[in-house]
Amino acid sequence: MEPTRSQRFYASGWPEFIWVIGGASIGVAAGLNSTEFRLGLLLDWPTNLWFGLVTIISALVGYFLAIFPGIVVIGPLLHDRSRINGAPFVVGDCVQIISGEHAGQVVRIYSTWQGDLVRVELGEEAKHSYQDIFGPLQLLRVTSES
């Protein structure tokens, strides 16, 4: 079974990244707009430092303000995508890894983890280094043992 482009996109973490970077960008634009920024003002160091400080603070404010609506908008979208992938997963399910170093491998779930994460059989080294933990967006159900 080959994952779709959509499944690969959501498994990569891009939706969350785009959301918070968009929020930070909107924050920067709003912050610079409130200072009536123009390129002609960048002629002396004190003004440059002021605009740099405004940019950093407004980016942080935009980033953190994007988190709250993101929970409402992105959260249900990601939950729906994980259901499409076959979640909730249980011990014994056979799943295909969609993203990361082990993409394409079909493995069995041997344990649940915190939240809705699961651990899959990738060998003893991965088990001891906790490299075998995956979320429901990163896995695609192949078969179910139940």
Image (cartoon, rainbow, N blue to C red):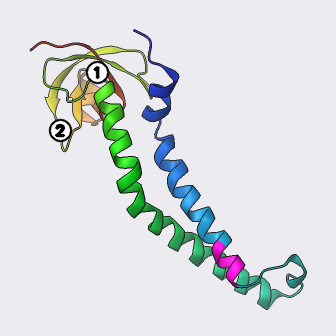
Mark 1 = which residue?
122
Q: Which kind of residue does numbered mark 2 sit on?
A: Trp
Circle 1 sits in a helix, a strand or a loop, which is it?
A: loop
Q: Nearer the viewer, residue 50 or 146?
A: 146
Task: Confirm whether the magenta stretch covers residue 23.
Answer: no
Horizontal and vertical percent position of residue 120:
24, 24
Circle 2 sits in a helix, a strand or a loop, which is it?
A: loop
Which residue occupies 64% across, 74% down?
30
Mark 2 = which residue?
113
- 38 above or below 81? below
Q: Which kind of residue does numbered mark 1 sit on?
A: Leu
Magenta residues, as a range? 30-34
Which residue occupies 51% across, 73% down?
61
Mark 2–mark 1 CB contact (< 8 Å) = no
Per the model, the C-alpha gap separating discs 2 and 1 is 15 Å
Q: In which quadrant of the rendered view does residue 90 lie?
A: top left
- 142 above or below 62? above
Q: Nearer the viewer, residue 50 or 23?
A: 23
Horizontal and vertical percent position of residue 138:
36, 30
Q: Looking at this view, name the residue that lies furthest to the left.
A: 146
Q: In which quadrant of the rendered view does residue 132 lie?
A: top left
Horizontal and vertical percent position of residue 103:
43, 21
Which residue occupies 78% across, 91% down?
46
Is residue 10 rendered to the left or right of residue 133? Answer: right
Which residue occupies 51% across, 52% down?
19
Label 2 vs 1, first from the N-terminus:
2
